[in-house]
Image (tube, rainbow, N blue to C red):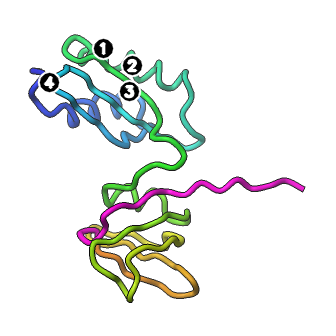
């Protein structure tokens, strides 16, 4: 595989074959510098051991790319329809290109996600937000205090 080729499909295939429980959140290739950043997620979270396992699985790619494997973080950007689908039930913030129901920025709970839009509950109302209208969306992390 050349450094100029898009490695996402290869990364997903290699990881899924070895660890089907791991989800490839994003693959960012910087062909000019030969760097590849792979962000992964799984139920229960990602730790250093999981990153090491994935790095080993990606040995064929490491021949061409300088590799970084990490978690997308707690306050991760939501950029693809499958991100929203995986995070239904969680809270996210939105900045929109055009208003939806008069709002251009808000936070709410992801209620449902399809291939073209996400449904968000905010302030007691449900908004259908087309993905093409989302300028930026980020998962919100809330710390739950124990009593």
Which residue is rendered at x = 33% and y = 70% of the image?
114
Q: Which residue position is annotated with label 2?
A: 55
Q: Which mark is residue 18?
A: 3
Circle 3 SS class: helix
Span shown in magenta: 131-147
Disc 3 versus disc 2: nearer the observer: 2
Disc on res. 59: 1
Closest to the camera, between mark 4 and mark 3, is 4
Q: Residue at x 38, y 68 (%)?
A: 95
Neighbourhood count class around disc 4 (C-alpha, 10 Å): few under 14, some 14–19, many 20 upward:
few
Q: Which residue is under mark 4? A: 32
Q: CA distance from mark 4 to mark 2?
A: 21 Å
Q: Of the residues under marks 4 and 2, which one precedes in the sequence?
A: 4
SS at mark 4? loop
Left or right relative to 40: residue 147: right
Neighbour tally class for label 1: few under 14, some 14-19, many 20 plus, Cα within 10 Å = few
Give the residue furthest to the top: 63
Write down the quadrant of residue 30 in the picture: top left
Name above or below for residue 22 compared with residue 133: above
Query: Which quadrant of the figure has residue 45?
Result: top right
Label 4, label 1: how far apart the Cα atoms are: 20 Å
Q: Nearer the viewer, mark 4 or mark 1?
A: 4
Quarter in which the C terminus is drawn: bottom right
Tell me whether the residue at label 4 lies in contact with that at label 3, contact meaning CB atoms closer than 8 angstroms.
Answer: no
Distance in Å between CA atoms under marks 3 and 2: 11 Å
**Residues marked 1 and 2 touching at CB (< 8 Å):** yes
Which secondary structure lies at badge 1?
helix
Seen in the picture, residue 80 relative to 3 is either above or below; the reply is below
The spot of residue 133 in percent (x, y) is 27, 72
């Amino acid at each position: 595989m050349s450094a100029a080729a898009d490695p996402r499909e290869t990364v997903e295939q290699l990881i899924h074959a070895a660890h089907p429980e791991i989800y490839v959140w994003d693959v960012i290739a910087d062909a000019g510098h030969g760097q590849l950043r792979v962000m992964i997620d799984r139920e229960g979270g990602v730790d250093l051991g999981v990153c090491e396992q994935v790095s080993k699985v990606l040995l064929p790619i490491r021949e061409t790319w300088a590799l970084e494997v990490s978690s997308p973080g707690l306050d991760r950007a939501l950029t693809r329809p499958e991100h929203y689908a995986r995070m239904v039930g969680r809270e996210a913030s939105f900045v929109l290109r055009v208003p939806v129901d008069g709002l251009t920025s808000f936070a709410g709970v992801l209620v449902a996600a399809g291939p073209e839009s996400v449904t968000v509950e905010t302030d007691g109302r449900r908004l259908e937000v087309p993905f093409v209208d989302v300028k930026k969306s980020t998962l919100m992390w809330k710390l739950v205090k124990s009593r």
